[in-house]
Image (spheres, rainbow, N blue to C red):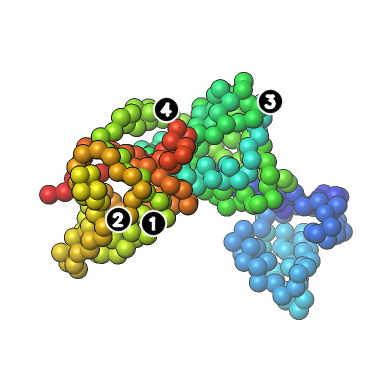
């Protein structure tokens, strides 16, 4: 906490991200009154929990010469031990003159649609991030954990000359997404050699970049298909959720899709010997191609389907053990989810 004559600056940091937000004395909603300038470091968890539980809308903070903070609100008074702010690490420096602007709602959507495929395994650190490529006035975001892949492309206004190729930790972008509100119309982005900065109003969000080269994911996405089926994303999601009620109790957590174009039939089933089985004939909009039986992890499918919202989708299959793709029926080129099937015996 750094208090100047006209603002309170709050800074938090860990090994991956740093966040700075400024509360101005000119902000009527903050009702900030400054008696004396100064700075202190307070334990984030305790300070946050105390503020949440205070009985009044306003509070008073006083810091003594031993860096102890006394927090008063109504009849409640807390005293917590702080540290000398001079020992707190400085914020990263972003040495970049270029700046991109992305609508807040679009950036939040891109993050939510791709972060689901980020790996949680630190054995391949590069896959714990989202690969962002900016060129030709477009932003391509892609993530994969080697079992599934999410890719989204959006147009950027005023960024025809910008060229970037970076990998940002998925956990960092998940935290950023939580901070983006409906009032954040535009978010400014600056990128340096090892840091990215996102500016949301009075808040600056810094994140480190992952080092290394991201795998060539374009070759993983099939260009042709043998079978295509059109579904409503919500209806299919509800069916998968029903089937997974039993599959989650089994050792493999697998469901099977049986497609029969000649009979115009698509059947979802799951067999969990420990519990029982389930079978449901699915409602679809269009079906073309040859017969196919394919098994997959229902959790991967549910994550993918949720990213499409209320959209109509097209699922394209090639072979029982080859990855299949899910795309919005009306915008097939700019958004794709890919899932690798499961081999069953």
Place residue 117 in its image quadrant. top left
Q: Which mark is residue 97?
A: 3
Of the image marks 2 and 3, the number of the one nearer the N terminus? 3
Task: Please rate how many residues cluster around mark 3, counting C-alpha atoms within 10 Å: few if below 14, some from 14 to 19, many from 20.
Answer: few
Q: CA distance from mark 3 to mark 4?
A: 24 Å
Q: CA distance from mark 4 to mark 1?
A: 38 Å
List the single residue furthest toward the front. 263
Closer to viewer: mark 4 or mark 1: 1
In the image, taking residue 192 as reference, residue 131 lies left or right, namely left
**Residue occupying image coordinates x 68% and y 44%:** 185
Q: CA distance from mark 2 to mark 3?
A: 53 Å
Q: CA distance from mark 3 to mark 1?
A: 47 Å
Of the image marks 4 and 1, the number of the one nearer the N terminus? 4
Mark 4 and mark 2 in contact (Cβ < 8 Å)?
no
Q: Dot 4 corresponds to which residue?
A: 213
Q: Which mark is residue 33?
A: none
Q: Which mark is residue 235?
A: 1
In the image, taking residue 263 as reference, residue 29 lies left or right, namely right
């Amino acid at each position: 906490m750094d208090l100047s004559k006209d603002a309170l600056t709050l800074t938090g940091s860990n090994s991956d991200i740093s966040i700075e937000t400024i509360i101005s004395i000119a902000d009527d909603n903050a009702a900030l009154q400054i008696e004396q300038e100064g700075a202190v470091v307070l334990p984030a968890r305790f300070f946050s929990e105390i503020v949440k539980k205070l009985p009044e809308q306003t509070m008073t903070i006083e810091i003594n010469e031993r860096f102890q903070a006394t927090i008063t609100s109504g009849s409640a008074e807390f005293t917590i031990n702080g540290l000398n702010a001079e020992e707190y690490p400085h914020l990263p420096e972003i040495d970049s003159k270029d700046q991109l602007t992305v609508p807040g709602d679009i950036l939040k959507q891109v993050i939510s649609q791709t972060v689901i495929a980020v790996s949680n395994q630190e054995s391949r650190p590069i896959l714990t991030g989202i690969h962002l490529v900016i060129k030709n006035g477009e932003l391509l975001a892609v993530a994969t954990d080697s079992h599934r892949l999410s890719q989204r492309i959006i147009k950027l206004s005023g960024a025809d000359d910008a060229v970037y190729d970076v990998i940002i930790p998925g956990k960092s972008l998940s935290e950023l997404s939580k901070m983006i509100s409906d009032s954040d119309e535009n978010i400014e982005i600056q990128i340096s050699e090892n840091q990215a900065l996102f500016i949301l109003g009075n808040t600056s969000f810094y994140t480190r970049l992952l080092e290394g080269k991201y795998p060539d994911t374009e070759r993983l996405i099939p260009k042709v298909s043998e079978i295509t089926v059109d579904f409503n994303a919500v209806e299919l999601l509800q069916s998968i959720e029903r089937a997974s009620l039993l599959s989650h109790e089994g050792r493999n957590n697998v469901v099977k899709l049986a497609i029969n174009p000649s009979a115009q039939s698509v059947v979802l089933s799951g067999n969990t010997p420990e519990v029982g089985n389930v079978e449901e004939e699915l409602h679809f909009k269009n079906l073309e191609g040859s017969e196919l039986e394919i098994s997959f992890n229902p959790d991967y499918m549910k994550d993918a389907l949720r990213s499409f919202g209320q959209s109509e989708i097209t699922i394209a299959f090639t072979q029982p053990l080859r990855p299949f793709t899910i795309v919005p029926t009306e915008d097939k080129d700019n958004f794709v989810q890919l899932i690798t099937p499961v081999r069953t015996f």
